[in-house]
Image (tube, helix red, strand yellow):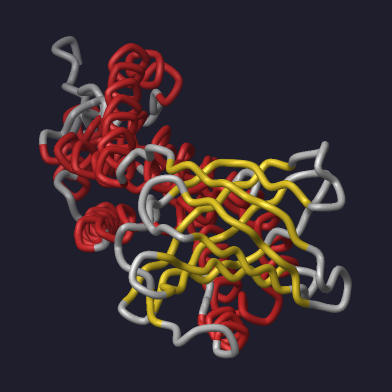
């Protein structure tokens, strides 16, 4: 989500004067929790937490979160030292560099740390990190799938319970002629364009499902360092599944010419607009935090979030337009509505009224 290479360059530059560096092995866990004690504040330990959110052949990157009263959180590079030990190098948001040395790579990590920088240069202390279990991204996504499916089932149940009231409210006072019925029947016109658009969207959601899964991997771990980011990531995964399942069921209702289709689609489009609005609000706060934490290195992520915000505005606009279509369309009423009496035209009365009956002569005359 955020480019980590500048932090790696800084970390490796610091380590070059200490050891011949190489990337840490895969023994590093994804999440650690522990404490850190400064030599000048031995009676005031601070909470220490490490989240690994990027792994590659060139290195491992995480976020070190240092609690009060010390502070000093920042992006952290993991670099191997000798055969069994390692260094963690944190570049803080204030410009200091914290070097954490550990004589082991597996299990609990502990050792001494020291600071290089303008603010607290030369200070140090002891630290300890214990690996913590984490939920796999596959398990998180399966949970998102379950939540999305339950939401769709609830939407279908609501549509089944309320569709009669919908048609009572939507009752069309105009009785269509048989010719009108013939012209408006079937999935044609704007309804056909709607079906085509939703079909293409379902294919896109299916193709990009891996992106939704990846949101719950490294980005999920980074989200631990940003308040509100993890709920937003999970909401996006649920929204992905909700849209995919919802479109498939909605197209099935259209195929069956079900009376549930109009209320179902209006409700689903409305929920999609609400989701897009919440996502816009959540992303606006996270953009500010990313810019503060990573500065210019977050430019790529910020551009991606801005594009997502633009897309969400499109979702809201499209939801409003197509909801009005499902409510006001005569074709929707004819295709999905209850059968209405045909408008009959009597051809006898006008003809008979225009015929002049001749007056018969009087017999008496």
Q: Nearer the viewer, residue 43 or 285?
A: 43
Q: Is residue 47 left or right of residue 172?
A: right
State the residue at coordinates (82%, 37%).
43
In the displayed structure, would residue 140 be above or below residue 349?
below
Q: Nearer the viewer, residue 82 or 295?
A: 82
State the residue at coordinates (73%, 45%).
67
Is residue 208 something that shows in the picture? yes
Number of numbered labels in the structure image: 0
Q: Quadrant of the C terminus?
A: top left
Q: Is residue 103 left or right of residue 241?
A: right
In the displayed structure, would residue 257 be above or below residue 288?
above
In the displayed structure, would residue 217 be above or below residue 83?
above
Q: Position of residue 341 (x, y in %)?
A: 22, 22
State the residue at coordinates (86%, 78%).
118
Q: Position of residue 9 (x, y in %)?
A: 55, 87
Q: Position of residue 27 (x, y in %)?
A: 31, 58
Q: Nearer the viewer, residue 115 or 265?
A: 115
Q: Nearer the viewer, residue 59 or 279?
A: 59
Is residue 358 something that shows in the picture? no
Q: Position of residue 148 (x, y in %)?
A: 32, 34
């Amino acid at each position: 989500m955020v480019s980590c290479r500048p932090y790696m360059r800084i970390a490796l530059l610091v380590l070059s004067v200490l050891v011949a560096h190489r990337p840490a092995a895969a023994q590093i866990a994804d999440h650690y929790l522990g404490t850190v004690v400064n030599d000048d504040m031995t009676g005031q330990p601070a909470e220490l937490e490490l989240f690994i959110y990027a792994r590659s052949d060139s290195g491992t990157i995480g976020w070190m979160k240092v609690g009060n009263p010390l502070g000093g959180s920042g992006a952290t590079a993991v670099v191997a030292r000798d055969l069994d030990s390692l260094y963690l190098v944190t570049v803080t948001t204030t410009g200091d560099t914290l070097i954490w040395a550990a004589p082991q790579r597996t299990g609990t990590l502990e050792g001494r740390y020291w600071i290089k920088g303008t603010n607290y240069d030369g200070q140090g202390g002891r630290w300890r990190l214990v690996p913590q279990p984490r939920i796999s991204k596959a398990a998180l996504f399966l949970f998102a799938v379950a939540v999305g499916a339950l939401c769709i089932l609830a939407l279908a149940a609501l549509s089944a319970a309320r569709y009669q009231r919908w048609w009572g409210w939507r009752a069309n006072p105009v009785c269509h002629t048989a010719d009108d019925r013939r012209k408006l029947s079937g999935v044609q016109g704007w309804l056909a364009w709607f079906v085509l658009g939703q079909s293409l969207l379902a294919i896109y959601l299916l193709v990009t499902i891996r992106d939704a899964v990846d949101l719950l991997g490294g980005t999920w771990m980074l989200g631990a360092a940003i308040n509100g980011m993890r709920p937003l990531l999970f909401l996006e995964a649920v929204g992905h599944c909700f849209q995919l399942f919802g479109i498939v069921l909605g197209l099935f209702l259209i195929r069956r010419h079900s009376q549930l289709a109009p209320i179902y689609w209006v409700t689903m489009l409305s929920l999609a607009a609400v989701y897009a609005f919440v996502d816009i609000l959540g992303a606006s706060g996270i953009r500010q935090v990313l810019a503060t934490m990573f500065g210019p290195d977050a430019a790529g992520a910020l551009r991606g979030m801005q594009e997502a915000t633009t897309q969400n505005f499109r979702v809201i606009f499209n939801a409003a337009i197509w909801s009005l279509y499902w409510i006001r369309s005569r074709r929707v009423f004819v295709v999905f509505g209850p059968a209405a009496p045909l408008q009959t035209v009597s051809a006898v009365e006008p003809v008979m009224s225009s015929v002049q009956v001749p007056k018969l002569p009087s017999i008496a005359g």
